[in-house]
Image (cartoon, rainbow, N blue to C red):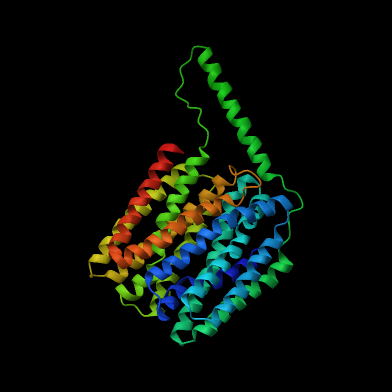
Amino acid sequence: MWRLGFFFHEMSFGLLSVFIPLYVLAIGGSLVDIGIMVAVALFLAIPASFFWGYACDKTRRYKRYILISFLSSAIVLSLFTFTSSILLLTMLYAIMSIFHIAHEPPKNVLVAELYSREQWGRAFALYEAFTEAGWLVGLALGFFVSVYGVSSTYTLFLCSGLNLVALVISLFLVADPVFLFERGLVSIEKSIDFTYRGVAIASRILDGYTTNERLKKENLTAICLGLMLFSLATSTLFTPLPVFLSSQLVLPTSIVFAVYILNSGAGVAGYIVAGRRSDSTSKKSAINRIVMFRAVLAFAFVGAALVPTYQVASTALILVLYNFAYALFLVFMLSLTMGLIPAGKSGLFNALIGAGAAGGSFIGPFLAEEFGFAYVFIVTGVVFLFSYIVFKVFS
């Protein structure tokens, strides 16, 4: 039940994911303005993620940072209604991003500490599926808001109110773990397993036997680099995507929300599948396949952008496959990295995603405005291929 507040929080940001880019254009901004606003916010969120992760692990208090995140989001979104200046909106959006990220490291720790390592995959999948359903409901709200012509001011107040609901629910339902030891046990277990395998291999060699077994430890640096490149590619594609759907495909705002609803529904399905397969799947090999699949889909987007026949249907299908694959990737990556990231650095995962997303959030809109959307999709595919190489060769 502790996840219920996150459901309403994601409802708010699901609606905002499409509303904000279109809102910036509506008040006279450009694609580059959108890119700058999102990039500044995400870059500032990187040190903030490290800070919140360190703070929650240092104090061993997690609930307070979740409440800070929800409260600050509610306040800043209400302040959005008092200005239509791009500069002020950028500043407010950046402030919101700094405090919004405060709930991410505590959330990851709560899942890791409330469940055993064997249950991490299913636990993360359950959380992500539940909150993705909230995101989907938020998109549905956006669809109805656009159909009935609700003003931007009331839409922003609606998003602010949803965060207040999340705050009140979390105040009563979220509780700090009594004991914190699961991540420490996993770290000890990995060290013992690595030592045992090394001794076993050395014993077989000394006894005159040949062995093809390799003593290889997870390369956290390579995993971090691959994750950052994956996030860079994802953000390069998705930051200007609402504009591509509304201007390039000439879709009304309500239909843009409908396409995103399909996309979010695929994410829910992906999290359910990931939860069922988390125990039986080799996470490293699954991650490699998913990254390559997303690279192929990015290049398929080029065809959807250049060939007008069935353009809307093909774009919607690619997006559905994209989000389904992302759900699998996120669950497997969270399960893998939570056992590798030491206590006190629980903000590292979100910081890496933020670093990649910050770069992509500027690169995507810039390429779209200066060269066209086809170049956005090509660059996205190339960066996904680099991510695949890093995961495959170095991690």
- Vertical position of residue 228 compared to residue 148: above or below: above
Residue 50 location in percent, x, y? Answer: 60, 53
Seen at 50% across and 71% down, the residue is 90
Residue 290 location in percent, x, y? Answer: 41, 50
Q: Is residue 153 left or right of residue 248?
A: right
Residue 297 location in percent, x, y? Answer: 33, 57
- Vertical position of residue 283 compared to residue 59: above or below: above
Residue at the right extreme?
A: 178
State the residue in front, 192 or 91.
91
Q: Is residue 146 left or right of residue 351?
A: left
Residue at the front extreme?
A: 87
State the residue in front, 389 or 352.
352
Residue 270 location in percent, x, y? Answer: 47, 58
Residue 120 visible: yes
Q: What count of labels does the image hold? A: 0
Instruction: Give residue 176's quadrant in the image.
Output: bottom right
Seen at 60% across and 26% down, the residue is 196
Seen at 51% across and 74% down, the residue is 89
Of the 4 image quadrants, the one containing the N terminus is: bottom right
Instruction: Give residue 197's quadrant in the image.
Output: top right
Residue 1 visible: no
State the residue in front, 285 or 373.
373
